[in-house]
Image (cartoon, rainbow, N blue to C red):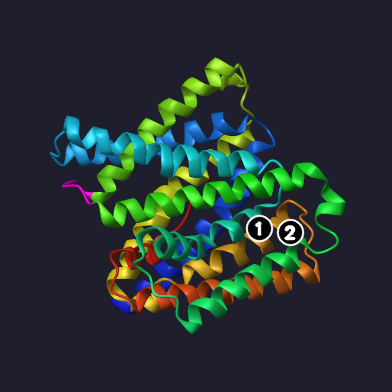
Amino acid sequence: MSHQKKAYLALSVTSIVWGTTWVASKMGVKHMPAFELASIRQFLGGSIYVLFFLMKGEKLPTGKQFLWLIPMAFLMFVSANGIATYGLQFITSGLAALIAALYPLSVVLIERFYFKAIKITLPTIIGLLLGLLGIGFIFYKDSLQAHGTNYLLGVGLSMFAMICWSVGSILIARNKINMNAYNSIGWQMLISACCMGLYTIYSGNYISLFEIPAVAWGAIIYMVIGGSIFAFISFIYSMKHLHPAIASLYAYINPIVAIWVGSLLLGEKMTWNSILGTICTLIGVYLVNRSLKNQKDPVSAVADADGM
């Protein structure tokens, strides 16, 4: 099999696995506290990365690097991943995945109004408007009325998590440290796991490891082995052997996968409003993503990263 065919296979793996991790996370929070789930997931995933690089001879982070890793762990994994996991208790996995995919829109707004670095072009404006229109379709009529205030809480938490991911992505793009990026991710996972683990113990909102049901352990193992390892390796391979515009298509496929798999496995209802909203939102995100890549600002690199 040629490198290109393998790369397309890797792209398929990335798209499907990262989309289904939202469904796995939703299944997990049905059986155990959300922050406990997130902390175990990040601890196992982070341990694998850190041990791999230690075995390769990488040194422990310096004090200066830890001063960078700690706040980034709070932004990218505690505030983003942890809170997104908590918000999944109140909304569908498909909607959570779609909100996470909105982060290029918030990146544009933050960059434009805080750093004055992004030019607002016509495609950017159209993309932003389509993104807002898509969210409007999803919230129309049957959403808030059918689900109540908890639904609104879940949406708010997911939006906050997405914004935290955006801020973290901007900081990473603008303030690089002399450290392997994947080793850095591993340490951020471990730091966040410790923080969320301490919070669950302090709050008392946890269950014994022996009381965690098999379905929750299955979800955790799938997210760690599938999402954090195989899908990530596949993503790197596809980025190396495919044009970036093609390799980044996973970001638009993830929410669609989450919506369809969530409807099949979890009985999450799909309405015409949600379908139209998803289409509008993903087109809007694509246009904004494209406008970012056409500009020279360093934050355009974050358009190729995803997956809370």
Highlighted range, magenta: 176-180
Q: Looking at the picture, how far across and down is residue 116, in whole percent? A: 36, 65
Q: Pick the quarter of the image with the N terminus.
A: bottom left
Residue of label 1: 94
The image quadrant of residue 98 is bottom right
Judge from the rendering whether residue 263 lies leftward or rightward of residue 237; answer left or right: right
Secondary structure of the residue carrying tag 1 is helix
Between 195 and 255, the one nearer to me in the picture: 195
The reply to whether the C-beta atoms of the residues labelled 1 and 2 are less than 8 Å apart is yes
Between 278 and 21, the one nearer to me in the picture: 278
Residue of label 2: 263
Secondary structure of the residue carrying tag 2 is helix
Is any part of residue 224 visible from this angle?
A: yes
The image quadrant of residue 59 is top left
| 39 in the magenta segment | no
Rendered residue at 39%/78% (across/down): 245
The kind of secondary structure the magenta stretch mainly shows is: loop
- Look at label 1 and name its amino acid: Gly
Counting residues from the start of the chain, the first of labels 1 and 2 encountered is 1
Q: Looking at the picture, how far across and down is residue 48, in whole percent? A: 33, 38
The image quadrant of residue 67 is top left
